[in-house]
Image (cartoon, helix red, strand yellow):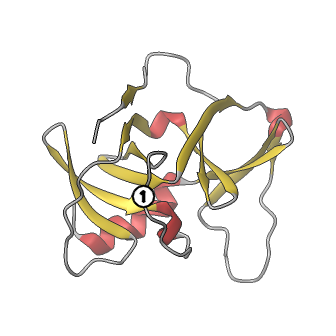
Amino acid sequence: MTENTVTLNNDDDLKGKILTFNVGDQRYGIEIVYTIEIIGMQHITRVPGVPSYIKGILNSRGKVVPAIDVSMKFGKEPKPYDDRTSIILIQVNDLSIALIVESIEEVITITDENLASVPEFSQINSNKYVKYLANVNNQINIVLDCEQLFSDAITQSNFN
């Protein structure tokens, strides 16, 4: 399998830039300031005793990184990985995490006019992983709160 790598330049003005990707028929995004690089699918070593959405660990430039299947994290049925499956390496605080996503879409720039608050659906905070919504080109993008989304995975997995 060939490895396609895109390294993002963190020297640019990254404010308001969102990397978007697909999970099922929904488009999600993460603030690009968390993104280290995007790579093709790699060998992942299974680790016993971790939640099923943590697919295992991978080697990223000599560093062991937990790999999380975002679809499974959101409770969706696992899908076979294909040539569109990508890994987004992110840095949250001092931790590196590999996010396995169905496909990468694009980097969008959002402004205050694109922002929408997250509606409350129930008394239970079912949207604790959503930072905000961005409506760009008539497409709703659910922008994830990386610190909330992956704090429990890292705590449970003992990778830190």
Q: Residue at x 34, y 51 (%)?
A: 97
Q: Against 25, is 83 above or below?
A: above
Q: Furthest-left residue in view?
A: 62
Q: Position of residue 40 (x, y in %)?
A: 36, 41
Q: Amino acid at mark 1?
A: Tyr
Residue at 31% x, 70% y is 155
- Relative height, residue 119 to residue 97 (above, below): below
Query: How dense is the environment of label 1, judged by Cα within 10 Å: few (below 14), some, or many (20 and up)?
Result: few
Question: Which quadrant holds the C terminus?
Answer: bottom left
Q: Is residue 122 left or right of residue 70?
A: right
Where's the N terminus, which quadrant?
top left
Residue 16 lies, in percent from the top left, at 65, 30
**Between residues 17 and 69, which one lies in front from this camera angle?**
69
Q: Is residue 137 left or right of residue 62?
A: right
Name which residue lies at 41% across and 53% down: 99
Circle 1: element type? loop
Residue tagged by mark 1? 81
Residue 17 can be seen in this image: no
State which quadrant residue 135 falls in. top right
Q: Position of residue 77 (x, y in %)?
A: 53, 75
Q: Nearer the viewer, residue 75 or 129?
A: 75
Could you tell me how many numbered marks the image carries? Answer: 1
Residue 65 lies, in percent from the top left, at: 24, 52
Residue pictured at 49% horizontal, 67% vertical: 79
Residue 100 visible, this orientation: yes
